[in-house]
Every structure is written in C-alpha cells, then in structure tokens.
Image (tube, helix red, strand yellow):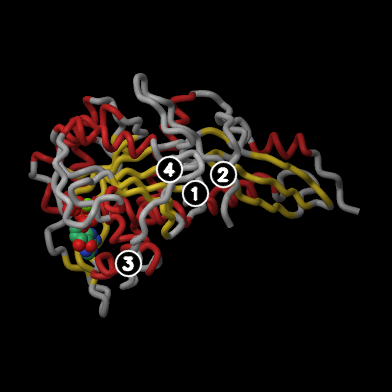
Amino acid sequence: MAEPVALDAVRRALTAVMEPELHRDIISLNMVRDLRAEDGVVSLRLVLTTPACPLKDRIEGDIRSALEGKVPGVAAVRVSWDSDVTSARGLPGRQEVPGVRNTVAVSAGKGGVGKTTVSVNVAVALAQSGAHVGLLDADIYGPNVPIMMGISEQPRAGASGKMLPLSACGVEVVSFGTILKPGQPVVWRGPLLAKAVREFLYEVEWGLLDYLIIDLPPGTGDIQLSLAQSIPLSGAVVVTTPQDVSIADVSRGIEMFTQLRLPVLGIVENMSGFICAHCGERTDVFGSGGGRQLAERYGLPLLGEVPLDPRVRTGGGDGQPLMAAAPASPAGLVFRGVAERIAAEISKRNFAATEGPEMPAGPRIAVRP
Ligand SMILES: Nc1ncnc2c1ncn2[C@@H]1O[C@H](COP(=O)(O)OP(=O)(O)OP(=O)(O)O)[C@@H](O)[C@H]1O
Ligand SMILES: [Mg+2]
C-alpha cells in the first residue's frame, strides 16, 4: 500500500517551480489546476498564458524535480497542458474588437521586405500551437494575403449581417484582396484608409481570437500613423532585412510606435542568409546581423532571423504558406520561434499590466488538440 500523498505538501513544493517568462511561481500564478494524487501518482493540469509556449519541457522537468523523491509518497507525476491566453489591456480612446484578446501589427519601413510573409507564417504557426488566430490584411494597396494563403472565395455575411472571415490553414482571414475587384484602383488616402480598416476590424464577426495579426500597409507615413492611432494594438512587430539597418525608415517606424506608446514586441530579420538546400551551407547574401544591431540599438528583442528559402515564396506550390507546407524546414522552425517569442512578449506585457498574482479570468477557450 503506497503512502498517501498530502496535496498541501505538493502545493507547497510546487511554489519552488517558476514560470520562466513571468518569473513567478506556478502556484501564485494560479497555473496549477485539477491537482490529484492516486496510488502515488500526482496529476495536474498546467494552464499556460499561451499555447505557443516553448518551455513546456523545462517546466515539466522542474515540476518533476520538485516532487519526485521530495514529497513523501510521490512515485510519478503526470502533467497535462492547457492554456488561457491573457487579454491586452484596452488603450484609452480606442474601441476594443469584440472577442479579440490581443492584436499585433506587423510593420516595415519599406515595401518588399517580407511583411506579409511574416504575418502569414506567424499566424499559421500560432494556430498550429493551438491558439485561435485571425489575420487582417490591412495592406489595401497590395493585399497579398489571399494569394499566399490560397484563398480565392469571397467572404459571406453571418447571421448578424457582419462579414465572416475565410478560414485557411486554421487561421481566420479577412483581406481587402477578397472584396476588391482585380485591377480596381484604390484611391483612399490616410484617414479615409484608416476608416476603411477600422470598418474591417469592427464589422467582421471574428469570433473568439487569442491573437489577431494585422498586416499593415508599408511605410511610416500618415496611413500607418492614422491606423496605429485609431485601432487597439497590443504591440507591433517590425520586419527588416539585413541591409536595411542604415535606412532611416526602420528607425522612424520604431520611433513612431514609441511615440504612440505602442509597445514594439521585437524585430524580425528576414532574408537573413541563404541556406543551400543541397549541402545546408549558409551564405549571407545581403550581409547579416542588421536585425540584431537594430534590436540592440533600441533595446528590443530579436524575434528571429528568417533565412532566404525558395519555398517561402512557393510554399507547397498550391498557395500554401511555408509554415503549412514545410514547418520543419529551417525557415519554418524560425517562424515557429518568432511566433513563440511574440506570444511570450504579449504574455509578459499583459502580466505586467495586471500586476496581480492571479491571471485575469476570462471566458475559457478550449485548446485544439
Ligand atoms: N525568407 C524568404 N525567402 C524567400 N523569399 C521570400 C522570403 N521572404 C519573402 N520572400 C518573397 O519576397 C517577396 C516579398 O515578400 P512579401 O510580399 O512578404 O513582402 P512585403 O513586405 O509584404 O511586401 P509589400 O510591401 O509589397 O507588401 C515575396 O515574393 C515573398 O515570397
Ligand atoms: Mg505585403
């Protein structure tokens, strides 16, 4: 007959296990649920602040070391995972998007650096982790998201009369590209464009979303400014290429967000070297380290360095983004890391904003298997 396990002792022992990003113990963070002990087997459900958490193995290892051989009677530990993504605190004067917990703008100082590529692949990576994810293509001048995600249908209206997003690769997608006629010129400027994007944001039945990724139009001009000022953003991600650092546009973008008090979650360096598909050797086509230098200069996280890979452009050949076609490729692994780092930055900021020991209660969202 196994020695009975005292759950109080288990709970006390678990106060030594820290959440590595939030630097608080998992008991005071209220992350441990359904704690049980039966025949020496302790089981618990750990509720993370994001399903895109790369540190599960480490946390599980820490839980085992805190319990096995330390708390009397514990012969084995079983951890199951769950998540409850925290919500960003609303910004004054900005209407929240119903059902949407966090909004992330993807921006770049100039066109063609891979903003849409990063938006699409990060959205797919977050969805693959089990999060509920939306993607708004706010780039009205070059709405490329439908092409990259293989979407050709037109959106329908839901029961409420609001537009329903189109689903692709597990992501809820809304794009100007699906409602504009091919070749239709876009004459909106600045504030009018921001108004159009706002309508898109609020007149869509998004459902419950953990993360809404917004692919912003290029540039740091008045369009971006009007948008960043009028929509609720949890933060922005800035995409650059290795040779871009000297270009003042990137810095201007970061400074614009800083002035608007919008957190820049980090920098993604895209087209960062070419990895040969045959021998795996890396060649720095455009130089390297630009993203890192920029990140250091502004004290921002470097979220990842995405290599040049022809599959990023072609995906699966049928309009599938790389993250869906080849998630285990070198670029795919970097995109997954970028998604995890974005999710971690959001969790940290939401936690710092609430400053409470308990995670804010919200409607529970089941994690997809
Ligand atoms: N890491 C990469 N490897 C290979 N090709 C890439 C990579 N990143 C982007 N590309 C390709 O470069 C082109 C530009 O990328 P993308 O459309 O994402 O840039 P953008 O910043 O959104 O451009 P725009 O300013 O026109 O919106 C696309 O054809 C894309 O497939
Ligand atoms: Mg684009």
Front residue of this view, candidates 317 and 265: 317
If you read the primary sequence from the N terminus, does the residue marked by circle 1 or circle 2 appear first? 2
Disc sitting over residue 319 in the figure? 3
Q: Could you say where residue 117 lies in the image, as x and y percent from the top left?
A: 27, 56
Q: What kind of residue is marked 3?
A: Gly
Q: Residue drawn at (22%, 46%), measured in percent from left and top?
A: 140
Which residue occupies 35% across, 68% down?
Answer: 329
Residue 330 appears in which quarter of the rendering? bottom left
Residue identified by numbered label 1 = 131
Among the 4 quarters of the image, the one containing residue 314: bottom left
Label 2 is placed on what type of residue?
Answer: Ser
Give above or below for 55 relative to 226: below
Q: What amino acid does circle 1 point to?
A: Ala
Q: CA distance from mark 3 to mark 1?
A: 22 Å
Identify the residue at horizontal 69%, vertical 34% (top origin).
Answer: 12
Task: Please identify the residue farthest to the bottom as the structure is shown.
Answer: 278
